[in-house]
Image (cartoon, rainbow, N blue to C red):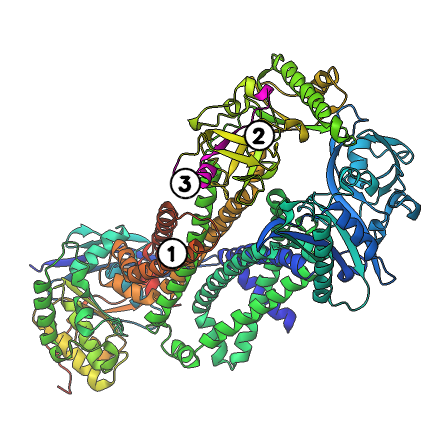
Amino acid sequence: MKETILTMSGITKVFSTEEMETHALRGIDLEIYKGDFVSICGPSGCGKSTLLSILGLLDMPTDGSYKIEDLEVSQLTLAAAAHIRNEKIGFIFQSFNLIDELTVYDNIALPLRYRKTPMSNADIDHAVMSCLTKVDMAHRAKHRPNQLSGGQQQRIAIARALVGNPALLLVDEPTGNLDSKNGDAVMDMLKTLNLEGTTLCMVTHDPRYADMATRKLHLLDGKILAPQTHTNANAVIDTF
Amino acid sequence: MLVKDIRACLYSLSKVKVFTITIISTLALTLGTLVAMFNLNFTILSASLPYPNAEQLYVSKAVHYIKDRVEFDDFTPIPMLLEIYENEKTPESQTALFGYSEEVIRSKVETPQVNTTYITPEFMPMLGFTFHLGRGPSADEGLNSMQPIAVLSYQAWQKYYGQAADIVGQSIQIDQVNFKVIGVLSEQNREPEMLTPGRLTDVWLPWDYYSFQRRDAQHWGITGPNRHVLIKKAGAVDIPTINHQLSTHYNSRFKTQTASSSFFDDMTITLELLPLREKIHGDSASKTIWLLLGALCLLLIACANIANLILARAVNQQRDMAIKAALGAGRGHLSRGIFIELLILTSCAAMFSFAVSELCYYLLRLVAADNLPGVLNLSTNFITVALCLILAVLLASLGAWLVSKRINFKQLNSQLQSSGKGTGLQIKTETRKALIFSQLFLASLLLLACSQTFINAWGLLSQSPNFSTSERYEVELNQLVEQRPAREQRDAFYAERRQQLLDVTAALKQNPQFKAVSLTTGTPIEFGLSTFLATDSGFQAQYSVSGNIVDESYLPLMEISLLQGRNFTTEEVNSQSAVLIVNQAFAEQLAPQGDAIGKRFYWLNGRRHIQYEIIGISENLAIPDKPDTARMWAVDRLSAYTPAFIIQTHTGQQILPQSINQTMAQISKRWRVAEIQPLSQQLSNSLAIHQVAGWAALSLATITLLIALIGIYGVLNYGVSMRRYELGVRMAIGASPKSIVLGLLGENTKVIFTALGCATFATVAAMAWLANSEVMFSVSLLGFVLPLSLIIGITAATTVLAASGVITKPALYSLRSN
């Protein structure tokens, strides 16, 4: 039996202004299992990013239940949400979101420095160098993000997301700011990570990359349209 | 177009109420204070005096020197004044005599003491005085005419005569003379405050009745303050040359007239004509310029605050500006919008600043009317309005320039290209830290200076003066002016006066309301007698000292401690023994070896042929600014001076002048109560400058703290605004709110402590400089610890406040740059 990483039930998200209410999500039911590679597709404004934000505890749902490893997380305080995010979730953003003032090494070490239980410098160093090696960027440890190409920056972002050994990796348009060659390389890396056991949930516009996932979700007007289909988990990109 | 822009700006500002209120209040507060201080300094330094041809008006000033040391500053013998008055009167030059005094109106039951000025008829026309009722003195009522006439000020007419319409022609008795009121000055007249700031004349009387004129008109050796010649010189005059000529001439006259006394052998005299402005304002500008600089410093801090706030707002408006830029708006278009918005803010602040200025004037009148000239007449005028509006436009222009310089069109474009995902503008760390440093440094510096000044003033105000003032009153007496008796009758004359005073003292001691009564010439706060002791009867080896003549009750009543020796005895008082008590500072001067008791000295104002023995040494009086001044007390020659009583009442009892007048009238008509003043009030008055300093420092510290609070918040908020996206990223990867705040604090720790260190160093350097000057200033550790702790506390609190916009919302809100 597959181990459930997270469960969403009846999740809604309403954005309110003085004049109007916008229903971004309208009753999302979703389960993600350990080892899944889920892609979320849909047109602009369908709620992809909102769903990903709620999945990553970057935002809270208006209503519904959301559990991560059987822990109800839909109404957590900001501090508690930060703790869960730090321990169990890794983020990869479209625009990399590396901090310019920090070196590559320090960018990757950052999640470990926010740990509730402080880690020793030796442990941090081991984890960081291990991740840097995994993304083949160990030689760039002392560089600053703005000294790297877009593809390299995204690899650093992946390393940062992996360094805390998260249960779930959330990926937001990982190739959106990359050319096709670098985009493909990043996707290949993500696929490899999935094959090694990492659970991924990815938002993408690109059907080629969406097809690489084991499950594809189609969102429209805040609802999951199609049944949660399993795709060819072994799909690879033509170029590779 | 302009109206539309204004409407758009007003709408935009209505959406950011806290920003709007913060800018307007900060600017109104500092602009109002600056304009008020500018007005004060302008009045002192540049504003034209309200007198016809004021630049032609001069006041005589004579200075007595012994060798090169100033002995009597601005003291003039009466015969010298009379000669100046006559000699300087030419077709091009007018002169008027005037001398200040205080008198009692004996024709009123409550015998009020009033400020009087004795003048010759030329005085009022030279100052352009106008009359509400009647007229001023005419030419035939001039010098030596002995016409008993009086002119009332408008305020005295209101206060003492209830605005009686028939006052002209009535008589008022001052001393033994009934003066006929011939006029009341109009309310608009502004008397030049030449004696002390805030001192205004109630009754104007003829010079002929000036007590010193009647007594000392022939004595070049008797000098005194508060009497001058007012001179109006038409046309171009070479004042330095005139002063040199006057000094040479009058020194020669002085030497000739005092040649018979060896006391004046080493004494010389100079005479100069002081411009009226200088006479009125003296060195006040040296004090008020500091207030102006303080206000300017406040405005600078406020400007730094406002710059930070408008930069933070510009950051928030980036996307709007990016859209406008994409639609073709150039730098000028964007700057125009910013300028209009800032002009609305600064104009509103300017309007409110007038109220702040008026509040400053009110506070100045309340605490500094007796210390700073011109304070009574300060008000909003054309110049202050113009200055305020110019500053408003200037500040709006500077702000618009600053923001427009920071607009980066490339970044604005990238903002749009990335659809708001991921290109939050980042300000350089160095810039951010420089802003925090400047803010903290200026605020800390001002706060440290204010704290030290306040604690210093508070220490002086709260320290014991080494005598008691509680339930103790000085009863000043007014005595009839009598002709100096012939030499052979003088002893009997003084003996009679003395006996009368002792009888009155004895009678007052019988009053059950009074606990103790002492007969004296003055309080420990105001030593009226400036005199000399000497080891030789020729007064060649002399010691300058201030003194009072007292009785045996004085020191116990005032609770002045004796460190050595003993108090005067009743027998010594009755027999006018040649004994003295000196304070510790004077004892150390007279006998550095510490053996002052028993030493004997000649006393200039005593019986010159005999020596006076020191029988006691008292503790120094701790009067601020003069703690180590030489003091002495004697029991001899009491009746030669204007006497006073020090009365200690039983708790809750009051002293009424009528009661004391009644007691005195039973013994002699010679005496009347002039003024009754609590010693606590007298002490408080002598500390006025420290009170002003204390209040000014406290007010400035409060404003500084308020502005620092806004400013530091502004800087940190700006920093957080600029880093909002980055902080969002940190939160996205698991940073808790606490770690975000700690991170912000940690990043700023170095710059905070550098700024505090620099401010402390600058303050210490300023104090070291002050220690080498004549300013008495003690350094307080609390004066450092308190403001620095406050600044650190404020910084920590404002960091939390600034970060609250990020840490109290889900991380997603920070990641959305729009």
Is disc 3 on the same chain as disc 1?
A: yes
Confirm whether the magenta stretch covers residue B289. no
Q: Circles 2 and 3: CB distance less than 8 Å?
A: no
Left or right: B624 with respect to B754?
right
Query: Along the polypeptide, which appears first: circle 1 or circle 2?
Result: 2
Gap in Å between the C-alphas at discs 2 and 3? 33 Å
In the rendered image, is residue A211 in sight?
no
Gap in Å between the C-alphas at discs 1 and 3? 35 Å
Specify start and end residues of the magenta stretch as a single range.
B573-594
Query: Along the polypeptide, which appears first: circle 2 or circle 3?
Result: 3
Instruction: Out of B599 and B392, give the one closest to the viewer.
Output: B599
Q: Position of residue B636 (x, y in %)?
A: 60, 27
Query: Along the polypeptide, which appears first: circle 1 or circle 3?
Result: 3
Question: Callout 1: helix, strand or loop?
Answer: helix
In the rendered image, is residue B320 in sight?
yes
Gap in Å between the C-alphas at discs 1 and 2? 37 Å
Instruction: Write down the residue under mark 3.
Output: B592
Instruction: Write down the residue under mark 2.
Output: B679
Q: In the rendered image of this protein, does residue B562 appear above or below residue B746?
A: above
